[in-house]
Image (cartoon, rainbow, N blue to C red):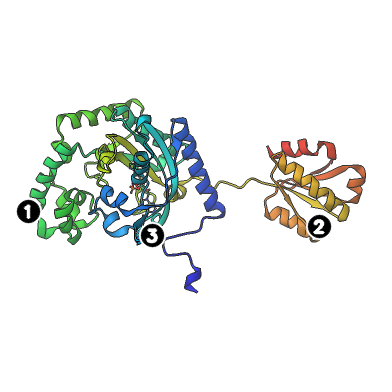
Amino acid sequence: MAQLQPVRGTHDLLSVEMRKYRLVVNTALRICANYGYEEIKTPIFEFSQVFARTLGDASDIVSKEMYTFQDKGGDSLSLRPEGTAGVVRAFISEGLAQHMPLKLSYEGPMFRYERPQKGRYRQFYQIGAELIGTDSVEADIEVISMASVILRELGVADKVFLEINSIGDKESRDRYRAKLVEYYSKHKSSLSEDSQKRLGLNPLRILDSKDKKDIAINQDAPKLLDHLNDSSKHNFSAIQEGLKQLKIDFKINQQLVRGLDYYNHMVFEFKTEALGAQDAVLSGGRYDGLSELMGGPKAPSIGWAAGVERLCLLLPGEPVAARPVTIIPLGEAAEKWALAQIHDLRAAGLTMDMAYSGNMSNRMKKANAKKAVAAVIVGDSELAAKEATVKMLDSGTQEKVAFTNLKDKLKSIQS
Ligand code: HAM
């Protein structure tokens, strides 16, 4: 019954996994809102060109990993492999230039045809933030500080470390690329097969190759930071100053180049050693030319995205579900009473459950299985006395509570 399995690289989110997802997403979006970011939802698919032109035809994502299909109207569409290109497309097509600088946050599924393993999926979720329309260094510092606050709030800060690099402006990068091509050409036959291909297409990507042969050759490769022009150098050192001022620890990794073509100047990654090969938890950088590349206005921008599943894997504990109070009505009259009562109590914001049928011990078992904090037991004698038996399920203690006080009593139990 292979068809009844989820597709390879996809997964259902339920129970603890869903609670972790919700905690991560809600925490991130709440902190983004504190920083003035407003949430945006873009479609899950776009015209393929939105991604192909912007992420780079030679990038792994575009050349190997996109879910691209022709729809019935003959258009080539792709499931989004990341969020930035769609957000910038929306920025342009919604005519938002007069609102610059614009702060947008998002969460949702992304799709990449990658080899699935722990922390790497074909449908995965990202939370992300984009600050569109400013080249100020403060923006670079702000997006990193916001990311670090989110990671701290989630309790994962001690499992991640920040690496930054500058890939400079176009002038610096062109100069550097020429130097790299010259260097790698001398070692071409010793490079991995993939990197030999990259040499013609995107030589910078050889720098972050994980292949042993490439790593050895990379040791002596020309360094990017030695080829930055003065304005790029100045930009990068101002960012470092700001991070130091905010006491955000970082390491410069000259081999961090990122896999997407739209970046310039600073790129960064919060990495972890806790997830094996999937070491990138939250990644981003500046993309000053993307809007213009897509036919929009000049809008220097910076942003990041984090893998929600990877954050979930790093969470220190398991968020628990809200513990309900279970009503156990005994007899027909009590059932009628309970039906109206539970309606009111839920409307008052209480988390309520009902154990409808079975003998008393079965119903108690059900309440315990749902981790109920208390059971409200009502039979004929309770109805006559207009009071319920409220039993605390952890301690086993019980007391009579007048119907008129029930709501307040349960509120105090659940708060
Ligand atoms: P990215 O590095 O491709 O950047 O992805 C961002 C994050 O998504 C990664 O750090 C990782 O945590 C997670 N991720 C990526 N691929 C997978 C996968 N197959 N399974 C699970 N998690 C994954 C971007 O997407 C850029 N749009 C980030 C950005 C925003 N740059 C500027 N603004």
Mark 3 residue element? loop
- Circle 1 packing at 10 Å, graded few (<14), some (14-19), many (20+), is few
Q: Is residue 207 left or right of residue 148?
A: left
Locate residue 411, reporting x and y percent: 72, 37
Write the residue at 41% across / 61% down.
Answer: 9
Q: Which of 288 and 207 is in front in this view?
A: 288
- Where in the figure is residue 63, as x and y percent of width and height? 26, 58
Of mark 1 and mark 3, the one earlier in the sequence is: 3
Which element carries disc 2, helix, strand or loop?
Answer: helix
Which residue is identified by label 1? 186
- Which residue shows up at 87% across the image and 51% down it? 379
Give the image location of residue 337, x and y in percent: 84, 48
What is the CA distance from the residue labelled 1 to the residue labelled 2? 81 Å
322 on left or right of 208? right
- Residue at the outermost front position: 73
Helix, strand or loop under label 1:
helix
Q: What residue type is labelled 3?
A: Gln
Q: Which residue is drawn at 28% across and 35% down?
A: 297
Q: For the residues marked 1 and 3, what is the alpha-carbon distance in whole angstroms?
A: 35 Å
Res. 235 image quadrant? top left
- Please report contact status of discs 2 and 3: CB closer than 8 Å, yes or no: no
Mark 1 or mark 2, earlier in chain:
1
Check the image and report above or below for 325 versus 150. below
* Mark pair 2, 3: CA separation: 47 Å
Q: Which labelled disc corresponds to residue 360? A: 2
Query: Does the beta carbon at disc 3 come under 8 Å from ligand 1?
Result: no
Residue 117: which disc?
3
Q: Which tag, 2 or 3, sits closer to the chain's start?
A: 3
Look at the image and tell me whether residue 396 can be seen.
no
Question: Is any part of residue 78 visible from this angle?
Answer: yes
Q: Which amino acid does label 1 sit on?
A: Lys
Q: Which amino acid does label 2 sit on?
A: Met
